Amino acid sequence: MTFSGMIGRAALLLLGLAPTAWANIVTLTEGIENKHPAAYYKAAAQMFADGDRDEAVFWFYAGQLRYRVHLSCHPDLKPDGDPALFGALSESVGRPINEYAFGDPPALAATIDKVLAWDDATPNGYTPKTDCADAITTTREGLAGLRDEVLASQDEIRREREKNGLPNR
């Protein structure tokens, strides 16, 4: 193994990712910006199942942002199509991911900031940004509002989690 290969492997281990886990994340997200938003949920679900929970939180929220933009930009979609799929995925994939994510409100807020930065810097090949500027602005503001609400109510979130038997991280 080369010196740079050893450094790369050490960096992965410091991040808590085995090289195979990192390769899995790269495979799951390769070209994702051009795919239907459901692909983000699929990637997040697989990462969560594989134990890459913080990565799963990121891709779940990136997917939720992109899916909400898609729905907002196309209000004429059949209710039993993408809107129904969004609801089903948000419940089935989102529930366990959110149970984990809300265990550390500052980390969740930081992840939301990363999602917003990633979204701003990354093209959207499925729902082009030039076609949906208003939907993008409104949806991003909504996600930023969630971040602010999470930070403002983190003590209450922790108390509610304890009351409901959920761990805080």
Image (cartoon, rainbow, N blue to C red):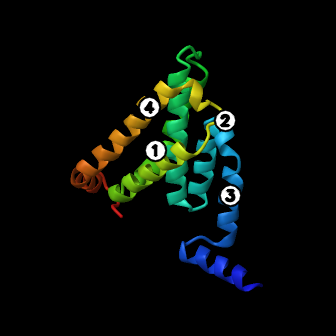
Task: Tell me the distance, in whole angstroms, between the alpha carbons under discs 3 and 2.
Answer: 18 Å
For label 2, the SS is loop
Query: Which mark is nearer the camera, 1 or 2?
Result: 2
Q: Nearer the viewer, residue 148 or 101?
A: 148
- Between 152 and 7, the one nearer to me in the picture: 7
Label 3 belongs to which residue? 26
Amino acid tagged 2: Gly
Marks 1 and 3, Cα distance to the nearest angstrom?
24 Å
Relative horizontal placement of residue 12, taking residue 3 as reference (left or right): left
Q: For the point 49% across and 43% down, which residue is it?
A: 94
Q: Amino acid at mark 3?
A: Val
Q: Residue at x 50, y 38 (%)?
A: 65
Residue 25 coordinates in the image, percent (x, y)? 65, 58
Q: Is residue 88 above or below residue 32?
A: above
Occupied quadrant, residue 131: top right
Closest to the observer, 127 or 104: 127
Secondary element at tag 1: helix
Q: Position of residue 66 (x, y in %)?
A: 54, 36
Residue contact at pointers 3 and 2, CB within 8 angstroms: no
Q: In the rendered view, would you say 82 is above or below 124?
A: above
Q: Amino acid at mark 1?
A: Arg
Query: Which secondary structure, mark 4?
Result: helix
**Residue tagged by mark 4?**
137
Reading the chain from its start, which is encountered first: label 3 or label 2?
3
- For mark 2, what is the residue? 125
CA–CA distance in space, label 1 to label 4 = 26 Å
